[in-house]
Image (tube, grey):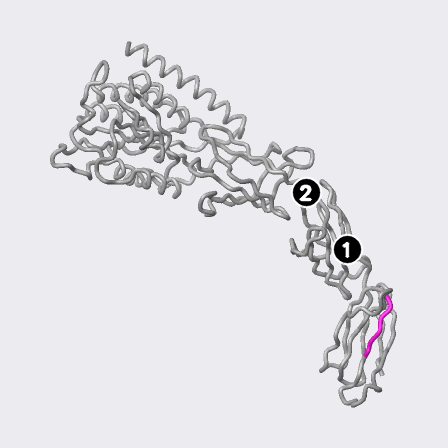
Amino acid sequence: MKSFVIKRIFLFLIIFYGVSIHNYANIQDDDEPPLTRILFVFDASQSMLAMWHTDTRIAIAQDLLVDLVDSLRHIPHVQMALRVFGHQSHFTPQDCDDTNLEVGFWDGNAGRIKRTIRQITPRGTTPIAASLEAAKDDFPPCDDCRNIVILITDGLERCGGDPCEVSQRLQKKGIFLRPFIIGVGRDFSKEFECVGEYFDARNEEQFRASLNIAISQALEATTTQINLLDIYGNPSESNVPVTFYDSDTGEIKNSIIHTMNHRGLPDTLYFLSTAYNYDMVVHTIPPVKVNDVRITPGKHNVIAAETPCGSIDVVVGGRTPVNYPVIVRKAGCMKTLNVQNTGVPQKYLVGNYDIEVHSLPRLIIEDVEVEQNHITTVELPQPGVASIRLLSRGYGSVFKETDDGLELVYRLRENVKNEILNLMPGNYQVIFRSRGSSATYFSVVKPFVVESGVAKTVHVR
């Protein structure tokens, strides 16, 4: 029977790992998957000596875990470690510090783990929260590792700790991903569902199946692909910032620049934790938000956002470069979406926009249409240069003549006698009165014409 069990587990892992490698090849070609580090947290409290079907709980758990460790020993990109609790001190008096990392992470340690498992003798109590807390120091620093905890226990917390709080806090810190818990003997799902992914092992067959499922999810890389869709539904948009927020707290968890890989496909992400519900914000103009994104463990997750984009380019005609700030708003709205400069194209979601050019006078251009993969060019005339010469300091303004009357363009400074202004082509007037004049009668009106690209002097006398 034992030989048959070993063969079943080993065959399952060979088939599963072959599928995993195939998935990795499809995702990233030559890129190696991250190192997966599996920490077994093993219950050796006194209750594990109880009889359970064909043998004691501890004997059955030891056999199955040893077989599993032996099957994992030759799989690349996988390391294992073993933490045990309840095995160093007797139950009376209760020792709530009875937890120890028996075998740490290193390559080729499977034999050491198997021997240690075989030598365990249950003695003490069940400090689950303390064991999870201590596990944060079991994982050496690593920039590209997936840290997995598999907790095997036949009981609940006995030392007053809060395994839920500890697990959730360490998941949020990125110490490990959502743990797997295998409950031996009876159903502890209500107590452990807040700790991690719970598997109910009420008999030996369920225990074996639970181990297989937990390992399969641990080995299968949890990956994510962000598809930024164009108007045709193709994931062609890229090179835009994307931020992931915790849906519950609003805390920023990750920020990236969306990237296409060397095959021209959205790059695969390995770092998004399965511990959170995310709100994803794509920082297009305007931004696009996708709420309640859940990362399914052991799967290649695809998150889609509709972000069809084109560009607006406001250019000034003529040979002389002139830079104007340009305010961009959604058509019919007053809220500013963006400020760009003339001559610098900017991307926007497909739609209609109003733009305000900070020229003299200001230009309002409504319903500028942005189309998919198209640069909408708004061409402005080359301004002319008006050098306004005053006989004395005083009070005055420059107006443009329009069909509706005079439009205020610029208020002359009171303490200067000369102003040089870049003005859009058109008919203008300077209305001016000297500071020394004490009667309205001395107000002066000076008409002048501005031509594109032409400089002229306007004498106000």
How many neighbours does mark 2 have within 10 angstroms: few (below 14), some (14-19), or many (20 or more)?
many
Q: Quadrant of the C terminus?
A: bottom right
Q: Which three-letter amino acid code belongs to the residue tagged 1?
A: Ile
Going from the N terminus, do you reach mark 2 or mark 1 first?
Answer: 2
Residue at 64%, 36% (x, y): give it.
229
The answer to whether one can see residue 454 in this image is no
Looking at the image, residue 107 sits to the left or right of residue 319; the answer is left
Residue at 72%, 78% (x, y): give it.
413
**Residue nearer the viewer, 79 or 433:** 433
Q: Are marks 2 and 1 in contact (CB under 8 Å)?
A: no
The disc label shown at residue 365, or none = 1
The disc label shown at residue 309, or none = 2
Residue at 41%, 32% (x, y): give it.
35
User: What segment carries the magenta color?
Assistant: 426-431
Tell me if residue 421 is in the magenta stretch: no
Looking at the rendered structure, the number of numbered marks drawn on it comes to 2
Q: Where does residue 314 sit, x and y in percent of width and height?
A: 75, 54
The residue sitting at the left extreme is 92
Q: Where does residue 302 sit, x and y in percent of width and height?
A: 55, 32
Magenta span dominant secondary structure:
strand
The answer to whether one can see residue 295 in this image is yes
Give above or below for 206 relative to 453.
above
Q: Which three-letter amino acid code belongs to the residue tagged 2?
A: Cys
Looking at the image, residue 185 sits to the left or right of residue 411; the answer is left
Query: Which image quadrant for residue 380?
Result: bottom right
Query: Which image quadrant for residue 264?
Result: top right
Mark 2 or mark 1, whichever is nearer to me? 1
Mark 1 secondary-structure assignment: strand
Q: Quadrant of the N terminus?
A: top left
How many neighbours does mark 1 have within 10 angstroms: few (below 14), some (14-19), or many (20 or more)?
some
